[in-house]
Every structure is written in C-alpha cells, then in structure tokens.
Amino acid sequence: MRGRSIRGSFVHAPVRGELEVLRVAVITIASDGTITSIGRAADGVPEGTIELPAGQLMLPGFVDLHLHAPQYPQLGMALDVPLEVWLGKYTFPLEAQYADLAFAQERYETLVTDLLASGTTTALYFATVHREATELLAQICLKQGQRALVGKVVMDDPASCPDDYRDASAELAVAETRAVIDHIRALPDNDRVLPVITPRFIPSCTDAALAGLGALAAECDCHVQTHCSESDWAHGYALDRYGKTDTAALDGFGLLGRKTVLAHSVFLTDDDMATVRAAGAGVAHCALSNMYFGNAVFPLRRALEKGLHVGLGTDISGGPSGSMLEACRATAQASRLLEDGVDARDSRETRGVPNSRIDMLTAFHLATAGGGVALDLPVGMFRPGYHFDALLIDPVAEAGTVRLFGAEPAERLEQILYTASRPNIAATFVGGDLVSGASPQ
Ligand code: GUN
Ligand code: FE
C-alpha cells in the first residue's frame, strides 16, 4: 500500500464519543507508510488506486496497551487463583523457560502471527527477564511487521522472586535494560519497534532497581511500563513498604512521565489520578484480567473525566483472550457492573456509581486512538501524518458472518465490534505494509 491510494469506506473515532465515517473516501499513503492525504472520491481518484471490495470497510488497527508475550502458552489457563499465587505457581516457571531461545522463538513467532491476524497493529509488550529472548521478540515483531514496544522485565528482589528467575542484582538489571534499549534502537531498518523500561511491579523490585530505572528513563527518553494498583495484595504491598501508594512511590522513583503506561490501576485514589494526570502518564485498562486478579472494576469513566490518557490491554495471559475485540466488549460490560442500581421499592440507590457506563463506541476509541495518545505515537486514527495501521473488515467472511442489520454507521460498527471474530479481519496493515491476510488489488 505504500505509495498508493485506497478508495473505500473508513470508520474511526479520533475523538471520544464521536464516530467519523469517511464514506467513499480516498486515503493516500506515502512511501514511508504514513498517510499523506484523505479526500472524497468525488473530488478525484489518482491512477492506480486500490478499490476496497464492496461491503468491506477499514478501521484503524488496534493498540494493545498491555500484554505479556511469554504468557501466550498459558492463555485461558490457571486463572482460578489470586495474582500472587498465579505468579509463583504458573507464570514465573513458564517465563523462566524463555532462557531457551529455541523455545522462545517458536512461541513468540506464533503469538505475533496470531495478534496480527486478530488486528493488533501496535503492542506494548512485557517480555521476560532474559536479555537475549527480549531482543529476539523485538526482532520477530520487526520481521513480521508489527509495531511494538518491547521491554525486558526487571525483577531483582530475592525476597519475592525465585532464584532461578530473577535479575542477579539491581546493577545488572539496569545494565541489561540499557543493553536492550541500545539493541532495539540499533536494529537495521527499524521503523516500528521501540524499547520500554519495564520494572515488573513494585513487589518484585528493590529500591535500587527502581531508582536506577527511573534515572535510565530520563537519560534515554524511553517509554516506561509497569503494573500499578492491580490487586488488593499488590496495592497493600506498596502501602506497607512505603507508607504511600504504588503510584506515589513510582513517581518518587522518576518512573511516571508522558511515556509511562500503568497497567490496571484499579485502586487509584483521587490523589493518584491527579499524579498520573500531572505526569501525562497513561493507564492500560485491562477489563478482563481485572475481573480475575482485581476482583474489581477500574473506574474508567471517572479517569476519563479527570483527563487521564487511557487505552485498552488484553493482559495476556492474566486475561483469557488476546483479542482487542474482546477487550472492547469486556470494557463495555465491566463498566455496567459499576453502574448504579436503585431499589425499586423506595428509590434508594443500593449499589454502584451513577454515570459509570462505557458504550462500545468509547471502547473502540480507547482501543485505537486512546492507545495511540497514551503511547504518544501517531497511530489509532486516519489522519495525515499518522501511520497507516489499519484493518480491513469483511462482514461476510466465510466462517464468520456478521449480520449488519443496523441502518446507521454507528449501529453497524457496534454490531461488528460485538459480533465479529478473527475470520472477519480480511487483512491487517502496519505502516502501509500488508502484515496479515490478503490485500485487495
Ligand atoms: N503483576 C506482576 N506481574 C504480573 C503479570 O505477569 N500479570 C499480571 N496480570 N499482573 C502482574
Ligand atoms: Fe499484566
């Protein structure tokens, strides 16, 4: 698609609460994979324009703002225990196996292939503690064409991490993080993979590692990601250790900035939200996984109203699906569990918080444009200067028919988001390149 124009219908949600339908439009893509212009087909169609098949439409690619690449083999398994048990019993032993690069290669290739087929064009990945396997994941993303941010996980506290799966010291953890940053930035022809500083979460890191990574973030102008206020246990751990919340502690270590993404953040206080907002940091809302490990619903509407940047994450494998369509559905559904309830007999509010609901259109905005804003990257919408990262939706794909009875574009998009599955994603493009499916001619 680079250097070509595409004619067809494009639907996106650059602004929360608003759907923009570009019906019979022409998008022109530069040779570097960014959008140069968006016009109406009625105003002229350049020679060699690619026509989208009748009935198909394009959406911006999904931005998965939080997932663990090494956990894909246990997707949909072992979710009936609390977070701290799940980590020690299942997750650390699985992640430890990525010391073996052949093991890592096979699983990472499969994951990236599956995510591209599912429409995830940008992914913010936790890898493992291993430097080489993390670099391998970055190489695989680049080779398969996925836009990705890849972080070597730091977990160095011997009190909470197993001896056979942790950084040997804080100094080594910081040095290896620096080496991975340098490696990813130096990859040949790298127009889409970025490094991320990745302290796993406060309970797994020493103060020396957290402080070292905070200094590195400032020095390298690098993205940062971590888990924050995910469960009662994790939240309480930071309160016990510091006498303040994990958000405040992360801020103190220099780990909150415009390019920071905090996964979960279910139990943020009003002060925490003000801190996150002041830093310009983002939240990866992981609605499905919060049901298992948070046993709670992130107050998403409150966060949006306070002006926080929010995107959606699948949290593979804390959430049992890697599909961003499922993340959209779970976001809308979970918000309803927070909505208020009124006792019909005496009109008293009996539960919930008024005005909590999130509609599907907002979930779609968060899964695309919201993720782009949180990462401070030009992705998630069709705009000149933005990367052409997109999905071609075929509502009547064999083995995946979506019945579009809705008359209005917003209704039809809603039906797609609620009922489409992987076969309906006919093609996925990143930076103007076909990375999955078949391209229209
Ligand atoms: N907190 C620390 N590590 C993890 C992890 O791998 N998954 C989730 N969901 N939470 C975590
Ligand atoms: Fe996670």
Image: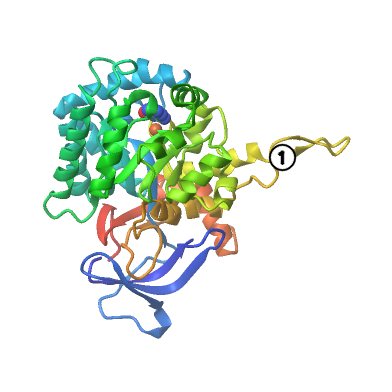
Mark 1: few, some, or many residues within 10 Å (few <14, many ≥20)? some
Quarter-of-image position of residue 251: top left
- Placement of the C terminus among the 4 image quadrants: bottom left
Please say whether residue 407 is visible from this viewpoint: yes
Its colouring scheme is rainbow
With respect to residue 47, does 181 lie above or below?
above
Residue drawn where x is 64% and y is 45% of the image: 356
Q: Position of residue 95 (x, y in %)?
A: 27, 24
Residue drawn where x is 42% and y is 62% of the image: 56
Residue drawn where x is 40% and y is 23% of the image: 77
With respect to residue 175, does 393 lie above or below?
below
Residue drawn where x is 19% and y is 43% of the image: 181
The residue type indicated by label 1 comes to: Asp
- Placement of the N terminus among the 4 image quadrants: bottom left
Q: Which residue in the protein does label 1 denote?
A: 340
Q: Position of residue 408 (x, y in %)?
A: 59, 64
Q: Position of residue 282 (x, y in %)?
A: 43, 47
Disc 1 element: loop
User: Residue reaching furthest right?
Assistant: 346
Q: Nearer the viewer, residue 264 or 325?
A: 264
With respect to residue 33, does 94 lie above or below?
above
Taking 164 as reference, is 183 left or right? Answer: left
Quarter-of-image position of residue 45: bottom left
Q: Nearer the viewer, residue 168 or 330?
A: 168
